[in-house]
Image (cartoon, grey):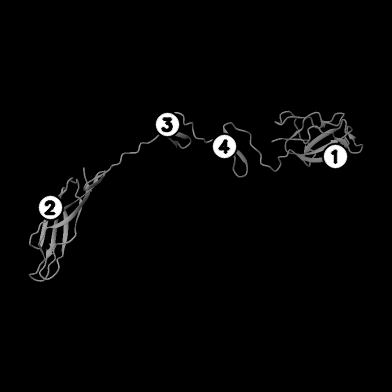
Amino acid sequence: MSGRFYDPNPVYFDLLSNQPAAGGFLTFYNQGTTTPKGTWSDSALTIPNTNPVPLDSSGRANVNIWLSGAYSVRLTDSLGAVIWTRDVDDGSTGQAQFPPMESGKFLTNDGSAYLWDDVRQVPDPTGSANKILSTDGANLIWIAQQAIPASNASSGAGFLRIGDYMLQCGKSQCPATGTPATSTTVTIPVAYTQTPFVVATVGTFPFYTPSWGGAGVIMARPSSLSAIEVQMHGNAGTINSETIVVAPIDFCWFAFGKVT
């Protein structure tokens, strides 16, 4: 980074005579030393000036003076007598500096210095109708929109199927027997390929017991891949007073398992 040396065309005066320092010189050094340090006549620092820089008869330098960093500057008259010495810099000392520009990148920083980084922008969507934005791990790209797969679930009266598994249900009835037990077999509409899980439920048991209220148990088991056997039994009461089935018993059944 460079900075221009103050007023580009000042008149330098001899402090003793209060006249322009005609034919004098500006000599530039590394700041705080007597080691000469160069200046330039262009901001890109490609055209060096002589050091010292001569002054004309009006006490002016006839070249632009661009600096790079910190300097000690000494003004002398035409005979080399020192008029003054001052410390100056290019104006960038202690400030963050921009790095040289790079095509196709943007300016950012890492918290302490400015730097150029790649521009990651969304690619042109022209010709990408019905596509979605994705990435290959390094670049943003448009890819074909993925079709939503068809649902593999279906349902209807008495069934719910998801893929190869189906829940089936229905209602049936065990007959009145006049005995403590009754049973029936239910045909499952769609046969399973593996032994299904089955269950049967009942609301009330229409059992008759001579001395106390009717009660019973219900059991269900798969008798095949397409049938359920349902059994009901009345609880035993006192001797010679067993519960008996005096009316048909309505029940609900459920089966779940794998189908073709």
Residue 175 as seen in the image, left or right of residue 70:
left
* Residue 43: percent from left, percent from top: 71, 31
Q: Which residue is mark 2?
A: 185
Q: Earlier in the sequence, mark 1 or mark 4?
A: 1
Depth check, mark 1 against mark 3: the one in front is: 3
Image quadrant in which you'd find residue 146: top left
Q: Which residue is mark 4?
A: 117
Q: Earlier in the sequence, mark 2 or mark 3?
A: 3
**Quadrant holding the C terminus:** top left
Q: Residue at x 57, y 34 (%)?
A: 105
Depth check, mark 3 against mark 4: the one in front is: 3
Label 2: how many Cα within 10 Å (few below 14, some 14–19, many 20+): some
Residue 91 as seen in the image, left or right of residue 241:
right
Distance in Å between CA atoms under marks 1 and 2:
120 Å
* Residue 112: percent from left, percent from top: 62, 44
Q: Are marks 2 and 4 in contact (CB under 8 Å)?
A: no
Q: Secondary structure at mark 2?
A: strand
Residue 25 as seen in the image, left or right of residue 45:
right
Residue type at mark 3: give it.
Answer: Ala
Q: Are marks 1 and 2 in contact (CB under 8 Å)?
A: no
Q: Earlier in the sequence, mark 2 or mark 4?
A: 4
Residue type at mark 4: give it.
Answer: Asp
Q: Which residue is mark 3?
A: 129
Query: Compared to 77, does 112 lie above or below?
Result: below
Q: Are marks 1 and 4 in contact (CB under 8 Å)?
A: no
Q: Earlier in the sequence, mark 3 or mark 4?
A: 4
Depth check, mark 2 against mark 4: the one in front is: 2
Residue type at mark 2: give it.
Answer: Thr
Image quadrant in which you'd find residue 147: top left
Q: Secondary structure at mark 3?
A: loop
139 or 246: which is nearer to us?
246
Q: Residue at x 46, y 34 (%)?
A: 141
